[in-house]
Amino acid sequence: MSYNIAVIVGSLRKESFTLKIANALTKLAPDTLKLNPVTLYDVSFFNQDLEATPPADWLAFREKLQKSDAILFVTPEYNRSIPGVLKNAIDVGSRPPGKSSFLGKPIGIISNSPGPLGGVSAAKHLQNILPGISGPILGQPETYLNGVGDAFDEKGNLTKEPLQKVLQQYLVAFAAFVDRQSKIAA
Ligand code: FNR
């Protein structure tokens, strides 16, 4: 059994560490997980006035979520929270009311920072935002990657071995969690 995982990338920056981590995860994933990075460049601002006739980009983003078996958020921290683009995408995906595209989907969260705290506050804010609109959130191992600034080579490959190990351990736990939740839901 193989599961499709939408990996939501919380940064728009071209050289984003978050995007590089998402790409590294796709390579480190066990055979049971197919990770598809989802960037947020094309998700336009949520505006409740547009809900009756949602823009095509909202529908496309929601469809990517709906087609996935689970969602893995990879996010940096902006001012002790998640970046606005990520909150906007969550708002878009959460609507219409009661029909959130995250509903029932097992959720993973990995935060990161070049700084010492690993973006822990961003991860904690996601844990506050999601429960009303998503499926269950994997609690452990808590994964707040710090010191990501020197973790990649010039081609963007993850070269810092301790981080590779942490990500591998996370993916093993996430694969088991997704499998367990999918069986419970079936
Ligand atoms: C940051 N950064 C940051 N880092 C952190 O650890 N805690 C924080 O609260 C913040 N706040 C913050 C606010 C804003 C507006 C910016 C632009 C940056 C630094 C941040 O971790 C760094 O820029 C990362 O490189 C951003 O992630 P990407 O784009 O590399 O994925």
Image (cartoon, helix red, strand yellow):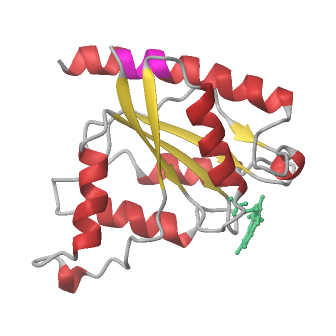
- Where is residue 39? Give x, y as percent: 49, 59
- Count of numbered labels shown in the rendering: 0
Residues drawn in magenta: 175-179
- Where is residue 104? Give x, y as percent: 26, 36
Identify the image quadrant of the N terminus.
top left
The quadrant where residue 173 appears: top right
Q: Is residue 102 visible?
A: no
Question: What's the residue at 72%, 62% (across, down)?
Answer: 15
Residue closest to the far bottom: 49
- Where is residue 58? Give x, y as percent: 27, 68
Q: Is residue 148 above or below residue 184?
A: below
Identify which residue, 117 or 75, lies in the foreground: 75
Identify the image quadrant of the C terminus.
top left
Question: What's the residue at 49%, 29% (across, down)?
Answer: 138
Q: Is residue 141 visible?
A: yes
Question: What's the residue at 16%, 54% (across, down)?
Answer: 98
The quadrant where residue 161 appears: top right
Identify which residue, 83 or 65, lies in the foreground: 65
Left or right of 133 in this view: 152? right
Identify which residue, 113 or 168, lies in the foreground: 168
Q: Assign the magenta stretch its main secondary structure.
A: helix
177 within the magenta span: yes
Query: Ligand 1 is located in which of the four quadrants?
Result: bottom right
Q: Is residue 57 above or below residue 109?
A: below
- Where is residue 148? Give x, y as percent: 81, 47
Left or right of 184 in this view: 79? right
27 within the magenta span: no
Question: What's the residue at 36%, 35% (across, down)?
Answer: 70
